[in-house]
Image (spheres, rainbow, N blue to C red):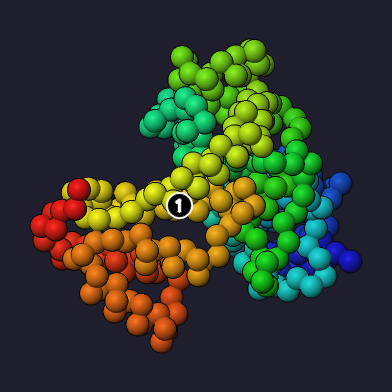
Amino acid sequence: MAIDTLQLLTWSRIAVARRAQLITELFPGGLADLNDYTAEDIKDAAKNFRSHPTVNQRFNVSAISSKRLVQLTLWVKDRIRLGQVVEFDDTTTQPIFVATLEESQQRDKIRKERKKNAEGLATMKIDPPLKSSAGWDGWKDAIKSALMLAYGSKGVPLLYVIREDSTPSYPIHIGGVAPTWEETAIDAAPHTGLDYDADRKTVHLFFMNNISEDSDAHAYIHDIIGRTDGRRDWKALCDRYENEATIQARVNQANKTWEVLVYKNERAMSFEAFSTKLTKALQYFEKAGRPKHDGDVIDWIWRHVQSGELSQHLSALKVGQSIHARTSREILQDIAKEVPNLSKGSGFEP
């Protein structure tokens, strides 16, 4: 069951005698009619009720009621953006109603700012641009981050264009935590309409600006460039760089890292570089469905950090690990804090 529209207007502080008239004037077909108005249209309508052509139908809409009507309109637009039913369910209370409308208005302000990010995508540069399989993971993450922060014509993060499943879905609560509106929008925004067509073109231009023209990546999507379809581009690149052969190649690379990577001192290799290489290898294992157990990673750290200057610190960490277990990430962070205290290179081991 949905909350009755008259109740929503009560919570919006619209006078009892004027609720039916306001519905007739603004949304006779239901709340979804508000999608046809801008926030400015609603403000103007609220003012115009004072000078209605029929004298006995003139009335004042208070500032708070006008604000609620604007917020309600923004909320309606958000529901329609995601293909959701335009209604409040019967568990909604007045405080929840007001908080939901306030959130819609805040989101509208964020949307205006993030649409500016979308306008800048055509010239935004990711360094380095995509050239081959070797740079795919870092490039992919940078692309997703940029698209998460840029809102397109549909008014949602452009990341929705390249989500895995084209069919809209609604994310579930995880551990009792509800998904954010942005997370819901990315999964639920329909891949239909002129706004979607505009958004996938925007994403295409962003890709073209960040793929080297003389690269394997550019050659692979060359035949579909004319379609200016960012989703099609993304699928082609994923087919190229996330197939079984390329995944196995990354696993082979990760296996080599796992076997030969060692840290001796800052002159031979910085600890930051060492940690980065290890982290990348672990990510490759995980993405291939072959994750390393964290206990095995910790044992690997004890064997592969081979710095004489760190030997006492490592011994202390091992003792501490038997008393209070920590993750491999925490151990790496602890070692990283100790590295600046070393006399750099004094124990250089070629």
Instruction: Establish if 347 lies above or below 241.
Output: below
Regarding mark 1 in the picture, which secondary structure is present there? helix
Q: To which residue does mark 1 refer?
A: 258
The answer to whether any part of residue 336 appears in the image is yes
Q: Is residue 70 visible?
A: no
Left or right of residue 328: residue 153 = right
Of the pair 70 and 329, the residue shown nearer to us? 329
Residue type pointed to by label 1: Trp
User: Which sits in the foreground, 108 or 12?
Assistant: 108
How packed is label 1: few (under 14 Cα within 10 Å), some, or many (20 or more)? some
Residue 322 spot, x, y in % from top left? 42, 83
Residue drawn where x is 46% and y is 45% of the image: 256
Looking at the picture, how far across and down is residue 203, in whole percent? 57, 29
Residue at point 67%, 48% (across, down)? 185
- The extreme right residue here reads 1
Furthest residue in direction bottom, as rendered: 323
Residue 333 x/y as whole percent = 34, 65
Count all numbered tags in the image, as a single digit: 1
Quarter of the N terminus within the rendering:
bottom right
Residue 124, located in which quarter of the rendered image? Answer: top left
- Residue placed farthest to the front in the image? 350
Residue located 75% across and 54% down the image = 170
Is 139 placed left or right of 307 in the picture? right
- Depth check: 192 or 175 in front? 175
Can you say whether 323 is above or below 331 in the image? below
Residue 232 percent across, percent down from the top left: 68, 26
In the image, what residue occupies the spot 66% across and 71% down?
Answer: 175
